Amino acid sequence: MSDKKGRPRRSDRPSAAVAAELKQKRDAFLHTFFRRGAELTDELVHENKKLRDTIAKLEEDNASLKTQLASDRAIRDALRKIDDLEREKARLLSSMHQQEEITGKMTNRFAEIESELESFANLYVASFQLHISLGLRSVVRHIKELLVQLVGAKSLAVYFVDEPRRRLEPIASDGVDLATVPAVPLQDGAPGDTVAAAIERAYLTGVPHVAEGDVAAQPAACIPLHIDERAVGVIAVYALLEQKQRFVTVDRELFKLLGAHAAGAIVGAFHYTRTDGKLPTPEELRAITG
Amino acid sequence: MASTYSCLVVEDSPMMRQLLVLALSRVRNLKVTEADDGVDGLRKLAGGKFDIIITDINMPIMDGLKLVKRVRSDPTHKDVPIVIITTEGSNEDRSRALQLGANAYITKPIQAPQVIAKVKELLKIEA
């Protein structure tokens, strides 16, 4: 009897042969089993290594992402800070511009106050000096000095009206010889000479002539002199000092002062001088004022 | 405590003197003494110590330029700053005054801020 492969059946074979066959089969199985086990172990070790690598990689990625995130946050913070700073800068610039504007206004105001202060000082000194004396010589000297020292007149003449002879007569001068200063006739028609015409016009109209801008032609100024509303003379400023190019605001104020006060001071000083400083009695004063 | 300065103004015109004194009254701690002309100026200098002198040129008795020469040759006052104030505006006049030893030259009509600034500059007073 034999099996399908033609080998004799186990029961037919001797037991030693069967045992050997079984042993061989067992060995083969064990060999295969251990080999497979070893292979599986290798695979597991390999797989484990791969997983470790993956974990390491993931941890690395994680760290990188964390860093990235931190970096992004820092950038966001920095951007926010920049925005804040930009806003602060805009606020400061706006504040600075406002301050500059205020400073500019203050500077202008300061200059205006300086100019006004100077005007007041000049006017105070001029009126103080104009009325400090009732001596005719002193009054006329003060008027000339005021024009030379405060206004910067180089040459000038003071005219007084001669009503019966219908003309303006020079009574004082500076920077020009009085003997050479011609009288100005008050004519119906305009005189030919421009200086005389300007003097006559100032007297007849009561409107001062004061050169605007740089003084280029004579006369630089003609100031009508009044006592109350009555025109009684003219101050003619022919030319200005070399360093004085033009009239300024304070000069015009001084001209107004002279126009209103100079003639009164001259006439008052004349009467006071002529009477040798004789004072009116209270009765005489009351007779007029009362 | 702030320093006190003394200034001598030598000017024959009472009007200009008054104007200068008024302008200089705006400089803090500046005491101003007035003199009518060069001789009066020398008299005032002999009687006191001054930190600055402001003088006119055209004056009777002794003019400003003679005063400058006298001051510069006087060991007591030779270093005192001198400001010339005058109606003469030409460059020759300016050069002459500066050659004689003046420190600054201001032409009339004066402007108070200009005088104040010059005095402060020469006395080294901060604006």
Image (cartoon, coloured by chain):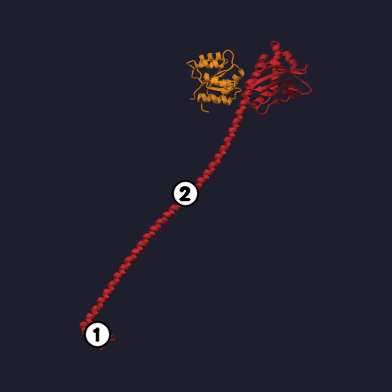
Chain colours: A red, B orange
One can see residue A135 in this view: no
* Circle 2 SS class: helix
User: Farthest residue in the bottom direction?
Assistant: A1
Q: Quadrant of residue A115?
A: top right
Mark 1 nearby-residue class (10 Å; few <14, some 14–19, many ≥20): some
> First in sequence: mark 2 or mark 1?
1
Could you tell me which chain the residue with mark 2 belongs to?
Answer: A
* Circle 1 SS class: helix
Residue A128 at x, y percent in the picture:
64, 20
Foreground residue among A154 and B112: A154
Q: Amino acid at mark 2?
A: Ala
Could you tell me which chain the residue with mark 1 belongs to?
Answer: A
Residue A130 at x, y percent in the picture:
66, 19
Residue A10 numbered mark, or none: 1
Q: Is residue A210 left or right of residue A40?
A: right
Q: Amino acid at mark 1?
A: Arg
The CA span between labels 2 and 1 is 89 Å
Which residue position is annotated with label 2? A78
Q: Quadrant of residue A43?
A: bottom left
